[in-house]
Amino acid sequence: MYAIVENGGKQYKVKVGDIIYTESLNLDEGSNVDLKVIAKYDDSDLVVGSPYLQSVANAKVVKNGKKRKIVVFKYKAKKNYKRKRGHRQQYSKLEITSIS
């Protein structure tokens, strides 16, 4: 059985026990969160909501952290224009505990 869940404007295909990385949820590690279910597939039976189902996917926050740094560099030739910036996106690591 798997489900399509939505969080932060993004959709994830999950099963029980899966680990997903989402945008930061500002929750403490070890806390639980309910994710909205868009579609659920269970033993050759696909159920699609409009837009969501009554089901929820329960997940546990395993870790909060930052991804690796990316460098944003702007440059215009022959104009003496250079800008260098870095960015680290924050994330929450979630473990799916149940889909009901």
Image (cartoon, rainbow, N blue to C red):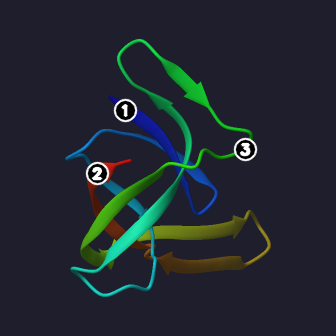
Q: Nearer the viewer, mark 1 or mark 2?
A: 2
**Residue 53 vertical position relative to residue 68 in the rendered view, above or below:** above
Q: Residue at x 47, y 16 (%)?
A: 45
In depth, the one of 76 and 18 nearer the eye is 18
Secondary structure under tag 3 reads loop
**Mark 1 and mark 2: Cα distance apart in space:** 10 Å
Which residue is located at x 45 percent, y 75 percent?
24
Q: Is residue 67 visible?
A: no
Residue 44 locus on image (x, y percent): 41, 12
Q: Mark 3, residues whose alpha carbon is within 10 Å: few (<14), some, or many (≥20)? A: few
> Circle 2 sits in a helix, a strand or a loop, which is it?
strand
> Residue at position x 35%, y 16% from top?
43
Residue denoted by label 1: 2
| Label disc, if present, on residue 98 of the rendered structure | 2
Residue drawn at x 68%, y 67% as measured from the top left:
75
Q: Is residue 59 left or right of residue 76?
A: left
Nearest the eye: 9 or 51 = 51
Q: How many marks?
A: 3
Q: Position of residue 64 (x, y in %)?
A: 30, 78
**Quarter of the figure with the N terminus:** top left
Look at label 1 and name its amino acid. Answer: Tyr
Q: Residue furthest top?
A: 44
